[in-house]
Image (cartoon, rainbow, N blue to C red):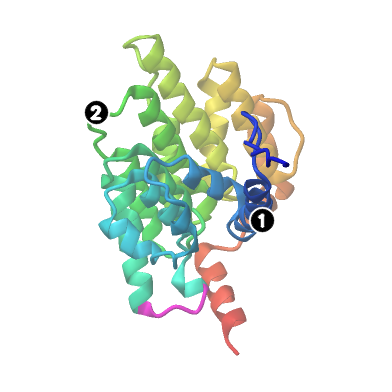
Amino acid sequence: MSTERTRHPQPGRHSGRSSRGLRGLLPLVLACCALSGCANFWDDVTSREFHFKDRFKRQPDPLWVIQNSPDGDQRERALRKLREPSQHGGSPQDQETVVQMLMWRAEHDPQPLCRLAAIQTLRDFRDPRVVQGLTRAYFAPFPNFNPETVTVIRCAALEALGATGNPEAINHLVLVLRQPRSEDNNVSKRQTMDERITAARALGHFKKPQATDALVGVLRGERDIALRDRAAESLQGITNKELPPDAQQWSDFLQTPAGKEAIVSQPTFTDKAIRLISFSKP
């Protein structure tokens, strides 16, 4: 009489059904990475509120998330997804809603990463109100933010002001560039210098006398090597002229016909907007 021997799975090994289940799940995980981006996928997986089945639900509208979600990570991702309606076939009402939403978040959101996301999204907008919004984001109160975080946000606002290409941003950038050296402590001195260096870099976007005059002024009166080098690099980018960080050489060159031509050759912000509108017409 034969007896049947019952086989029990060995500890530490998966049954065939479990292995097949995992093999069947792997393509699904990879598909999620391909469709939504591996970075965003793993950000979601590591989120405290992650549920795997939520990956297959229809994602909520970013504006709804920004207005209603208490989760700062979700708001940050939604803020980065926004695009300017006027550049993508949206209505004037859509434009108003999105611009006002981003400007408010850049100035008031309680989460630093959300403010940073709103600022970095606004840098690609062509709406003339963006300059005002970014300037207000720079001067906004920062309750409970540590000084290093404040510097990061302010430098992001300055960099975004330069990226807009709107000459109305020049006055604020020059104001920051010319701010006096902080005498409080080494941390404050470094933070102030970081902002001034960022402002010098941002002014390199503008072929305007106000920008070049401020940059030459840095070479004439500033001792900090990093700031002087950044000012010279911006002047080189504006004029396509290779000169050392010497105020007199730059001042002399900018008075020549070639120097004057280099400054006035940039289209104005209004010209760019008109050209964009004309290209978008059917």
Badge 1: residue crowd in 10 Å (few <14, some 14–19, many ≥20): few
Whole-percent x, y for residue 82 in the image: 45, 61
| Element type where label 1 sits in the image | helix
The residues colored magenta run 88-92
Whole-number angstrom distance, CA of label 2 to CA of label 1: 47 Å
Residue depicted at 69% across the width and 51% down the height: 23
* Total numbered labels: 2
Q: Is residue 237 above or below residue 186?
A: below
- Mark 2 vs 1, N-terminal side: 1
- Give amino acid for label 2: Asn
* Residue 269 painted magenta: no
Whole-percent x, y for residue 246 in the image: 66, 24
Residue depicted at 29% across the width and 46% down the height: 107
* Residue 89 painted magenta: yes
Residue placed under numbered mark 2 in the picture: 144
Q: Are marks 2 and 1 in contact (CB under 8 Å)?
A: no
Residue 24, numbered circle? 1
Badge 2: residue crowd in 10 Å (few <14, some 14–19, many ≥20): few
| Element type where label 2 sits in the image | loop
Q: Main secondary structure of the magenta part?
A: loop
